[in-house]
Amino acid sequence: MNPLLSLPGAVSGDGVDAPVAAHYGSFNNEQRTLEAGDGFVDLSHRDVVRISGPDRLTLLHSLTTQHQEVLASGQPTGFLVLSPQGHVEHAVFGSDSGGEEGVFTGHLEPGAGAGLIDFLTRMRFMMRVEIEDATSELAVTWRPAKQAGGAFDGYEFVPRDRIGAYAEAAGPAAGLWAFEALRIARGEARFGIDTDHRTIPNEAGWIGSAVHLDKGCYRGQETVARVHTLGRPPRRLTMLHLDGSDNRLPAQGSELLHGDKVVGFVGTSARHYELGPIALAMVKRNVPLDATLNADGIPAAQEVVVDPEIGLHVRPNLRG
């Protein structure tokens, strides 16, 4: 059992997030704590992979969307593995310790590590690379105090046998509900929840952060380059401002309607301490930006995350 679930007030999450705390008594106060730059979030249910050997960055550079060969030691990064058609199959976040004897340590959604390990193992051929599951050894946490402004800052790897001591030093603890509310407000997609099997990077706002446009070839690059050059991705990640008169949130994966037409699906939803109920959704590109949509029976206004014309991750200050 996760020892952090024994902290005062801890209430476990649901579904894939059940192994960590949803909140510790007040998710609104926990959001304020994180916004102030204090505390930490337990993400120890995420899978962790360790990639070592002198050819590790060469392997990752050739197979993924990120420019790995110039990766600085300790620099937070994210990369995707795409299908030949450009659909996102894996989303990984982590850093490399540098040097020929260094190690890349990355984290993924719960249960996703085995698929990535299998893919990289099959593709390494004669390269000097070792790939292993480190989930039993390392836990993932997130601390706002460790953010430096980058898209993947704030995450840490903590030895599992020291997680209790870490919590005492890094506290107060904030639950996943608070973390998710702030993530939604930032417009950051969560792989497999805010995305589906058809998602391409251009739709989810990953161009420029997890996708390097000026590196060599990799699987699925043609789709990414074509959509980036011509613009107009088929769908776009959107933040929804939900009508708060109904005391519930839309179910993850529920249909998003414009009138009587299905125009997308709802991903993560949460209650933000300032914005109220919000959600991320994947919406067809041609849906008018000012249209009120129906999210699982709840009226929802849209806020742009991914521009429908060019597919770049932009955040116009629509809240003034």
Image: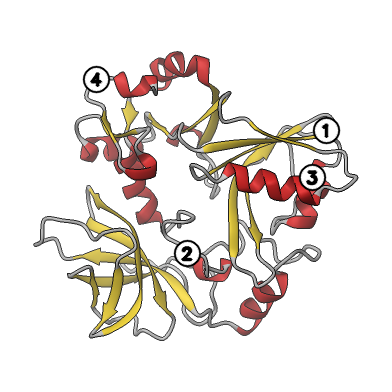
Q: Quadrant of the N terminus?
A: top left
* Residue of label 3: 57
Which of the two labelled residues, at mark 1 and mark 2, occupies the earlier sequence position?
1
User: Residue at horizontal 24%, vertical 61%?
Assistant: 250
Instruction: Give percent across and percent down for residue 21.
Output: 32, 32
Q: Which mark is residue 132?
A: none
Q: Quadrant of the C terminus?
A: bottom left
Q: Amino acid at mark 2?
A: Asp
Residue 157: quadrant of the picture: top right
Q: Amino acid at mark 3?
A: Leu
* Residue of label 2: 196
The residues tagged by marks 4 and 1 sit, at their Cα atoms, a distance apart of: 42 Å
Dot 4: element:
loop
Instruction: Give percent across and percent down for residue 182.
Output: 35, 48
The residues tagged by marks 2 and 3 sit, at their Cα atoms, a distance apart of: 28 Å
Is residue 209 shown left or right of residue 3? right
Q: Which mark is residue 99?
A: 1
